[in-house]
Amino acid sequence: MKIIHPSISCVILIALCHAGCGKNDKPIEEPSVATPKLAEGEVRFVDLEENPNDKLAYFKGSSEPFTGVAVDHHKNGQKSLEMNLEDGRGHGVLRRWDEKGQLTQRQFWDHGDLIENLTNEQARQAEAHFAERRELRATVWKKETQAQVYEDTFVGLWDNLRDAKDPYKVLLEFGHGDILLPALKNTAKLDWGIEMDSHAGGGTKVSRPDFVKKLEALRDEGYTIIETEWHQAEFDPEGPRSKYRFLIHAARATTRYIMRGAFTVDWPAFDENSEHYQPKTITVTEYQLLTREAPAAFNEVNLIDTALEFPQLKRAPEVHPILAYDLDRDGQLEIIVAGANRVYRRRGEQWFPDTLCHEPPKPMGTALLADFTGDSRADFLSTPIGRMPVLYTGGSKGEFVSKPREIPLDAPLKNAIACTAGDIDGDGDLDLWITQYRPPYQRGQMPTPYFDANDGWPAYLLQNDGKGNFTDITQQSGLDPKRLRRTYSTSFVDLDDDLDLDLVVINDFAGLDIYHNNGKGRFTDTTSQLGEQRHSFGMSHALADFDRDNKIDLYMTGMGSTTARRLEQMKLGRAEFPEHQAKRMKLGYGNRMYLGGNTLSQPAWNDVVARSGWSWGCTAFDFDNDGDEDIYIANGHMSRKTAKDYCTKFWTVDIYNTSSKENPVMASVLNECLGEMQTISWNGFEHNVLFMNNHRQNPGQFVNVSWLMNLSHEYDSRSVLGEDLDQDGRPDILVSHIGWERQAGTKPYYLHHLQNRLETPNNWIGVQLHENGPGKSPIGARITIRHPGGTSVRQVVNGESWRSQHSNQKHFGLGTQKNVASIEVRWPDGTFTRKENPKINQYHRIIPE
């Protein structure tokens, strides 16, 4: 081994090389004879050694790589260098000072990699930012700081339960006082053998020894704890007392259980020297127990892992965007994994990969299949990152063998991850609306203001000449003022049933924008009619008739933030930013349902479908064929080593004192903050949600039955499609997820095919539409099913969910109806095709007359 010295250490050499090297910069001095006393946890660089084999730093005489702080000093005793190391590598902040104690350099390292380097004034500005944050944390956010300390108790419980082979052992070892359990209030029976018991109010006090006996009895009887969530919804430092929301998924043989509810915790008094608190008493204020004894309704039958599909590539391709389409018009849907240039075709019960495009597309944000050239064949539109959009013209068998041609714009697309097509001007061809998403945090910029940001990269409205040639008409269309939104999903859809396509735009850091079309491609912004209910961290949307009134409703997913609710309950915020606090719960509210009509409106029961977590893609589908549109939602942002949540920093730090402009100082500050997410999560370990619509029995009642149907899945999900892939009348699910394993700088991507096997007595009918030339595109068509029980309506749209496209095959649950009077299709050009007395429980291909 050799001694690591600041002048020869690899890390310090890099630090010196990046220091700016001004004339006044001097090499780091040898430590003086009278070296100042070290602070607790510090060591001198001269006491570290570098192992020539692994190139890691070790403290002299130690066999373990060093973790801690290494320092050096000028001859006058002033500290000259301070660096954080973890497992023998630079990890965290490195600082350098001159002999007068002035900061001259500030770097941020991530496990040996240099991430940010600031010198002189920029370094001092960054240091001032962190000093201000520490001050605010101790003053303005003091209550939240305490809440975080107490929360660590249940974060630890959550982590231990998730990692344990025996969750009961974790619960038995979890220290607490008495538990008060509420009384049973009522029992209800839902569809498919689901029983729902609701508990609330006064109940029974259970001592810890008695509670241990109850747990042991459950374990001995074969009840298995599968998944949990624990979220601190409120905190009162005067108690101190917390309110928690909890979720437990359990099973016993073929019976599944969901327990969700709330409890309060009375804590010991706060002590700044204490790092762990044991609950004194736990009072369960209310909980709901859902039970279903039956085989799993959904089962995974296929998993696409792009790393396994392409082992020769260093970086596994994305699965996104994901599309479902009948490319070859054989009546069976294909699964298109566009990011990997793959199309999967079904043969019997198996799916086989094939190449999508003969000339592989560049990495893309989004894609769309539609007939843009008017030849009754589906073309493939792709939005390559950092390039112009391109169009692959389709062949007669659904193949894409031609070279793509660029669609010229005034600048390349930087990150277009949402687009929609439709005939906006009634000329018979499909026009395009392409939007972009500017990610926050990059290069020190943040959406500003965070609640109504219009500071991203431009969207484009492109008018088609009928042959796939496009002209930018954004400025004259009425869409120019908000074209800089940070958009995640968007759709052309006829909201007011006036035979033209309106526009829905779902934006992160803003929410919903609605534009009504005059029929000639001129749009009027009508968003203000929604008032404050338009705000959201908008992520995706679904369009369907959720309340069965034959009007198209809109469901928008967003981020339902427990942290925001807790800050609101404690009335915390920075006085100099009143609007930030005023908009906090508007943005952090969660998902929003808007019922259709002359104008969209949010129902009084919206809370029922609002809080599913950090939600991404979603789909409306009738999984049980009862005639009610259910909702499946992908959840979870970033799950890392622990459930400890970054969300507090977002709400107390990141949304303040930021700008849309790129800033190297703020880049360093934000990157250092985000560096914590190598370990901690951000809305991690959340579960996907299946809201079962119970409209027939109880309008406005949606019940999350995801675990009971084997759809809850704890991975960080993104795209969702609800499609009847095997055409058995039971819609299946495609859902993607992102892994965060640290491997060669890549993120693994997966696509899960979850087959619906729910047995019901209900009937169904399906409609398949294909490209039929100008004015007869499936896109924009309206399908009406008439039966003795009423009517069901569905529009064919695209741009829903997140980086996805649903097919032109539409499924309708009929409940117990045994016949259908007619299928009627209104095509985009206003003509109709009608089929009388179609057979139920099968698909019907409808062709224009």
Image (cartoon, helix red, strand yellow):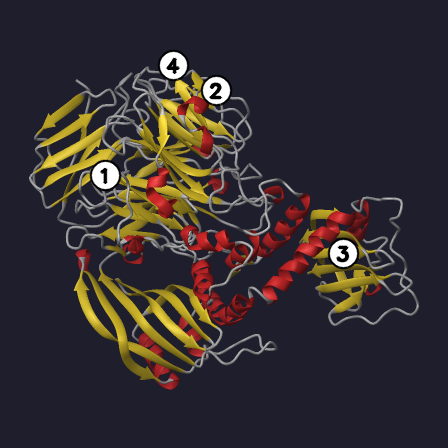
Query: Cα distance, mark 2 to mark 1?
Result: 36 Å
Q: Amino acid at mark 3?
A: Arg
Query: Cα distance, mark 3 to mark 4?
Result: 60 Å
Instruction: State whether residue 241 is above or below residue 128.
Output: below
Q: Mark 4 sits on what residue?
A: 465
Give the crowd class for mark 4: few <14, some 14-19, many >=20 residues within 10 Å: some
Q: Which mark is residue 655?
A: none
Q: Earlier in the sequence, mark 4 or mark 1?
A: 4
135 sits to left or right of 193:
right
Q: Mark 3 sits on what residue?
A: 95
Q: Which mark is residue 407?
A: 2
The reply to whether the C-beta atoms of the residues labelled 4 and 1 are less than 8 Å apart is no
Q: Amino acid at mark 4?
A: Asp
Percent x, y for residue 410?
53, 22
Give SS at disc 1. Answer: loop
Relative depth, front residue between 281 and 379: 281
Q: Earlier in the sequence, mark 2 or mark 3?
A: 3
